[in-house]
Image (cartoon, rainbow, N blue to C red):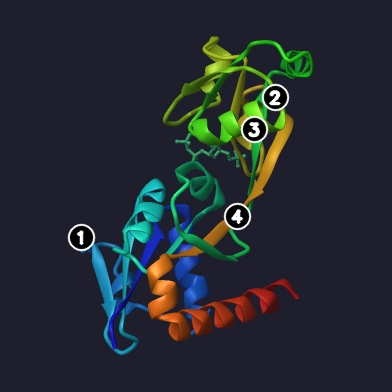
Amino acid sequence: MRYLTFALTKGRLADKSMALLEKAGITCREMEDKDTRKLIFVNDDLKMRFFLAKGPDVPTYVEYGAADIGIVGKDTILEEGRNIYEVLDLGFGKCRMCIAGPKEAKELLQHHELIRVATKYPKIAKDYFYNTKQQTVEIIKLNGSIELAPIVGLSEVICDIVETGSTLRENGLVVLEEVCPLSARMVVNQVSMRMEHERITELIRKLDQVIRQKEA
Ligand code: PRP
């Protein structure tokens, strides 16, 4: 049997991803050692391997088949636009992609003014403003701390992830419009889906069962 390779997103989603896989009977003891500098972890009994990657790289590994399966946020899937199958909503990492800013910026959105939008997600922002709202805007790509942009006058609004809303609140900003809901998803390489159909569909079935039990 060949090894199935999983690409997991480093950071917030990683522990939750392993916890969910564990409930479906997929464990990896090697990964439990938090001090290790190893990059790839193996479970020889299950014929599975796991590695951690930066979120935006997960769809890349999966598209090229370096990983058969990935666990990554819907935001990253939309932004990267890779040729992969999205097969399951894992029900954790829930948050929203929003347009936010000072409450006075609401009017600028309603009147379709030419405003500046700061974001880590230029593709999602462009799609929302150009296709959904049909508003011409200037999109400014940033790499983090997006909430700073309207505070220091770089942009009128931001397009960013809102989870608890506390970053916005603590900086005097509000949600102005909601772009879409987000959560962690399982993605699969298109060739792996055919070649390893039985193992992968069985895995999806098990995970789906665990998620439904959790939600019930
Ligand atoms: C994300 C996002 C917001 C924050 C939202 O940033 O970009 O800044 O979390 O969470 P909240 O609604 O619960 O406050 P992240 O912490 O990933 O860091 P970043 O600023 O580097 O993007």
Q: What separation in Å lies between label 4 and label 2 (alpha carbons)? A: 26 Å
Residue at the spot of label 3: 128
- Residue type of the residue flagged with mark 1: Arg
- SS state under label 2: loop
Residue at the spot of label 2: 134
Q: Residue at x 40, y 46 (%)?
A: 56
Which circle's residue, 1 or 4, is located before the other in the chain? 1
Q: What is the x, y in percent for residue 147? A: 55, 25
Q: Nearer the viewer, residue 79 or 53?
A: 79
Q: What separation in Å lies between label 1 and label 3 (alpha carbons)? A: 40 Å
- Residue type of the residue flagged with mark 2: Gln
- Residue type of the residue flagged with mark 4: Ser
Q: What separation in Å lies between label 1 and label 4 (alpha carbons)? A: 28 Å
Res 87 quadrant in image: bottom right
Pointer 3 local density, CA inside 10 Å: few below 14, some 14–19, many at least 20: some
Residue at the spot of label 4: 183
Residue at the spot of label 1: 37
Between label 3 and label 2, give the one nearer the viewer.
2
- SS state under label 3: helix
User: Does 183 sit left or right of 55 as displayed?
Assistant: right
Which circle's residue, 4 or 2, is located before the other in the chain? 2
Answer yes or no: do the residues labelled 4 and 2 have beta carbons within 8 Å? no
- Residue type of the residue flagged with mark 3: Tyr
